[in-house]
Image (cartoon, coloured by chain):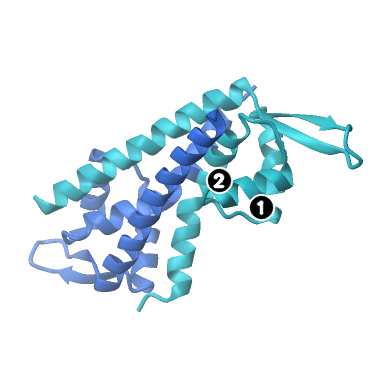
Chain colours: A blue, B cyan
Amino acid sequence: MASDEVLRTHLQELRRGTVVVASLIALRHPDYGYSLLQRLTGHGFPVDANTLYPLLRRLEEQGLLTSEWNTEESRPRKFYRTSDEGESVLHRLLDDLAAVQTSLTGLIEGVER
Amino acid sequence: MASDEVLRTHLQELRRGTVVVASLIALRHPDYGYSLLQRLTGHGFPVDANTLYPLLRRLEEQGLLTSEWNTEESRPRKFYRTSDEGESVLHRLLDDLAAVQTSLTGLIEGVER
């Protein structure tokens, strides 16, 4: 019998790559980590700070995000923004997600045949 | 600059969980490993034998697939089939994929606002 744990693992695996997609979309509008986390959660992408913050640093290292410190407020905050490279990768990922949907639909129909 | 390697990593991460979904759909019709691999590839889910075979064993251990040896041919083959539990998990995963699409669309529209 499939436990909740099994379901949770598969859901997590299915979700893992989509946080990257969601972040690259959301950061077309520059934002800092905690505010992004709240926006993603509000849009149905609940994500842990311990997952998101390292991810943002990784995406910046990969050149998919740029960052800038905003020091106008009392507390300096690092604002991330999707770079041109990030936008280009995002398009490929969105195309791939669409292809997955098409493939799954084809598979469902193929099996019913 | 984002290298091909960066894109490939993100595509892989995005795809990882979907092979489970594709396998659970495809195995509504019982099949053995290599034939399943060919069907998945034909439907746009290219997957390596070194990934698929351990995955099938894992899904069976989790109770999402059942298996049966077919010994009628000269070479005995293990046929896998999606179990009731597997079907139930599959539905949850498909619902979640649909929710991800809705969330991404909402996010894209929200950022454009």
In the rendered structure, the answer to whether residue B73 lies left or right of residue B63 reads right
Q: Amino acid at mark 1?
A: Thr
Instruction: Write down the chain letter for disc 2.
Output: B
Q: Is residue B3 left or right of residue B43?
A: left
| Residues marked 2 and 1, same chain | yes
Task: Give the left or right position of residue A85, taking residue B31 as reference.
Answer: left
Q: Position of residue B25 (x, y in %)?
A: 55, 34
Closer to us: B10 or A101 = A101
Sequence-earlier tag: 2 or 1? 2
Residue at the image position 36 percent from the left and 62 percent from the top:
A92
Q: x and y percent of residue A62 in the render?
A: 38, 72
Q: Looking at the rendering, in which quadrant would you find the N terminus of chain B? A: bottom left
Please, is residue A78 above or below residue A107 in the view? below
Toward the right, the furthest residue is: B74
Residue denoted by label 1? B51
Q: Nearer the viewer, residue B78 or A3?
A: B78
The residue furthest front is A113
Residue denoted by label 2: B19
- Residue A66 sits above or below residue A33 on the image: below
Kindly state the secondary structure of the residue where label 1 is placed: helix
> Mark 2 touching mark 1, by CB under 8 A?
yes
